[in-house]
Amino acid sequence: RVEMRTMTAAPARVHATPLNVARRVVSKPTPRRASAPSTRSSKSARANASEMTSTTASQDLDIDAPDPSAIYDVVDEDEMLYGASNTFPIKPDELVVKCKSALRAGFANIGDSLAEDFEFIGPVVGPLPRDAFVNAVGGFDLTTGFPDMKSNYHHFRVDPFETNRVWFQNRTTGTHTGKLAGRFEATGTVVECPPQALSMTFNESGKIVKITVGVVMDRTMGNTGGLGGVFGLFSAIGSPLPFPEARPWKMSKRYRFFQWLGRLSAKKAEAKK
């Protein structure tokens, strides 16, 4: 007896360039060989095939076509980064390499790569000029307190609106098994920071003119109370720094009052219906 295997179509996947700046190209799904006989019923298989056909039809539309009613429009990143409009002398691929090289060297060792007008900026820290930044990072070692710390950098890409700027993300993790900052004894806490956005901006000579760090992208993730950067590390081990900006966010009384007004207005509007 010949055993029939259910062949399923997998949606075509868009593979991004190293800079993740290529425009998405929608192609028709390509069938692939099933790795094992399907255990789904024929009814379920037919339903799945119908859903796949519907999905494919929607993919045939130009997903980048603007929709003013939804305030939806997508810029042409290829043109903005690699076309004639980008006049910055250092091309995107090379900028990403420069950014990664600086990160790999460590902030304490990139003083010679910083421009005279360099600034370091965090959500509440800075702007710090070059000399203040070099002195600050030179005397602060996180790896003593977190020997297994990993930055988990990812998603490096050049900003199409600022073609001299590289954006990237991290999800720092580490276990507090050493003395942090010379005074905070090991707690054994496994710290998981939320995803954070960072950037590095260069001038035409290839010097770094700005570094931004610690911008939390989802404060509900991790165990730092929604804090990024070193503030998050101290908070996670139970020793937050002694000022409000270094502590997990709390709704102010004034904001709670406005929230209450909003709920009251909603109830009145509902009662009138």
Image (spheres, rainbow, N blue to C red):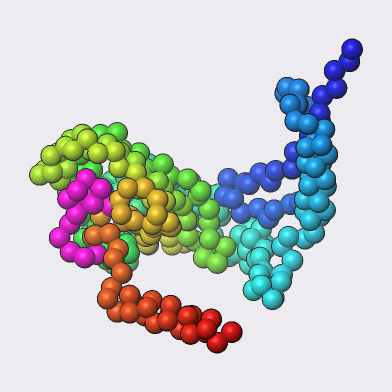
Give me the residue at 10% from left, 44% from top: 183
| 17 displayed left or right of 256 | right
Q: Tell me, yes or no, whether the highlighted magenta stretch contains residue 237.
A: yes
Residue 268 versus residue 104 in the image, above or below: below
User: Which quarter of the figure is the C terminus placed in?
Assistant: bottom right
Q: Position of residue 114 (x, y in %)?
A: 33, 57
Q: Residue furthest top?
A: 1
| Corner quadrant of residue 42 | top right
Relative depth, front residue between 258 and 115: 258
| Corner quadrant of residue 82 | bottom right
Please indicate, yes or no, whether residue 269 appears anywhere in the rendered image. Answer: yes
Give me the residue at 77% from left, 50% from top: 55
Number of numbered discs = 0
Q: Which residue lies furthest to the bottom in this view?
A: 272
Q: Position of residue 66 (x, y in %)?
A: 71, 70
Residue 191 versus residue 119 in the image, above or below: above
Q: Where is residue 11 in the image (x, y as percent from the top left)?
A: 74, 42
Relative depth, front residue between 183 and 103: 183
